[in-house]
Image: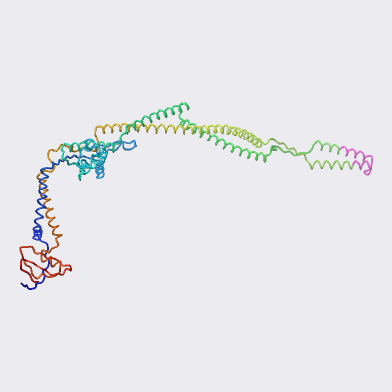
Amino acid sequence: MTSEYSAPTEQRPFSARDFVAVVFRHKRAVTRCFAGILVGTILAIIFLPPLYKSSTKFLVEHERMDPVTSPGSGATQMVRPPVTEEELNSEVELIKSEDVLRQVVLANGLQNRKSLSYYIFGTPDEAHRIAKAVNKLAGNLTIEAIKKSNLIDVHWYTTDAHLAASVLSSLDDAYLKKNVTVHHPPGQFEFFDQGTDKYQKDLADAEGQMKAFSEQEGGVSPQVTTNLALAKLAEFQAGLAQTKAQMASTQERIRDLQQQAGITPERLTTEKKEADDAQVLQGLKNTLMTLELKRTELLTKYQPSYPLVQEVDKELAQTRASIAIEDAKPVREETTDRNPTYAWINQELAKAKSDLAAYQAQAAATQAIVDQYQAKSRDLDQKGIIEGDLLRNMKATEENYLLYLRKREEAKMEDAMNNTRILSVAIAETPIVPTLPAIGPVLMFAAGLLLAIIFSIGLAFALEYFDPSFRTPSEVMAELKIPVLATVSHKRPVEVTRDGNGLGALDQVASGSGLNL
């Protein structure tokens, strides 16, 4: 039989008919897989024990604000910030911690539950069984923080309903103890109690030292005495400065008075007289008269040229000359008296010198007093430093004592809250013994049915993928890149094989009839 040549058609997309065709081409394998899975599910429902689910929930909140958080002495602000995601995740990790799970294992004896491996490999030692039980419990527990809430959900599946509730109850207790240990470490009350006793003794010692120092100073604070001494010192220093100023002024006055005394005369002329020497002049006149009488007497006897007359004439001339001299040179008489200015200068100078000596003595005495008060002030400064150290020590010790006393009471309240389970974490849902299994027979059958369908169809497509034969003309055209001239339908499957080069001919064998290409 011959057929005309026709152009190859385009490859059509995969359709629902092709999907069904794949399943029907491998219907024997699909049927066996589906039946096997479904039978296994039915046997599991019949023979396996039911699984029970027990759950518990924890509420994380900031209802409790612990005061013992810092060494400050101020009151703690009771501001409750919102619970963050990091805090929830931290609490989840605390629940998963190995020591918490180990307590749960030991409390419920999970390490003593035997498995098939124990019968095959033998029973291991206690530590190995505990570690294995802890790992198994960690793998079976489901712990997650519920979104947009402060809740942490914990649930566990097991075949023993009472064991499930007991395990989660033990987990609640172990986690709460762990939370107290982590967030509220023990020993705070003992620490602050020891610190309170220590600082109480230190305060008593500091008060004793302060009292002894006060008694040593006569009950007067060195600070008060220092203030009084400084006031007196300032007063005496002002007096000393004034005295020195007066000394300088007096010394300058003395120098000026001494200068004035040098240029001021000691005496003053009070009266001045000029007169002839009457006694001398009278004697000369008497002598002149006597000589004239003598000359007259001689002239009566002798001539003017006579020697005696001439000698008398000479004496007369000398006497007249003496009288003329005396008339030309009068006798002066001056009267002097003590100068009052000079006397005042000397008096003021003596007074100034006396005042200077007094000022010098006063300055020396005041300087001695100033030195004494300065030494006393320095000594009081040292004592003031000692008193300040004692006061600071006593104040610091008192503050520490009051701080530790307050913190001890706070720690005592915290311990009381820990003992009564007043924590920032609360059990929102306590575990109870479940009465109904978590997964019922209907649900298990539906799940097995779904798995049977999925695995059966998957097996069909897997066999289809690994099958090397051609089943449709489109596969021949897509794989060999040659046109299909004709197809012949037959009841028996048509097998088309590929040659080595990908360009072979189609041979169809069909019960004595053939197809020429």
Tally of numbered tags: 0
* Residue 466: quarter of image: bottom left
| Location of residue 174 by image quarter | top left
Q: What percent of the width, then of the height, locates residue 35?
A: 9, 51
- Whether residue 426 is visible, yes or no, is no
| Residue 206 on the magenta segment | no
Q: Nearer the viewer, residue 164 or 342?
A: 164
Q: Magenta residues?
A: 289-312
Answer with left or right where residue 222 lies relative to residue 78: right
Q: Is residue 462 left or right of residue 334?
A: left
Q: Is residue 472 left or right of residue 78?
A: left
Q: Magenta stretch mostly in which secondary structure? A: helix
| Res. 364 visible in picture | yes
Q: Name the residue at 32% across, 32% down.
A: 189
The percent coordinates of residue 425 (x first, y second) are: 23, 38
Q: Is residue 488 above or below residue 342?
A: below
Colour scheme: rainbow
- The one nearer the camera, 220 or 368, is 220
Coordinates of residue 10 in the picture (x, y in percent): 12, 68
Q: Residue at x 90, y 38 (%)?
A: 294
- Name above or below for residue 25 compared with residue 409: below
- In front: 25, or 437? 25
Looking at the rendered image, the quarter that the C terminus falls into is bottom left
Residue 496, percent from left and from top: 11, 65
Q: Hey, which quadrant is residue 192 in on the image? A: top left
Magenta-span inclusion, residue 292: yes
| Quadrant location of the N terminus in the rendered image | bottom left
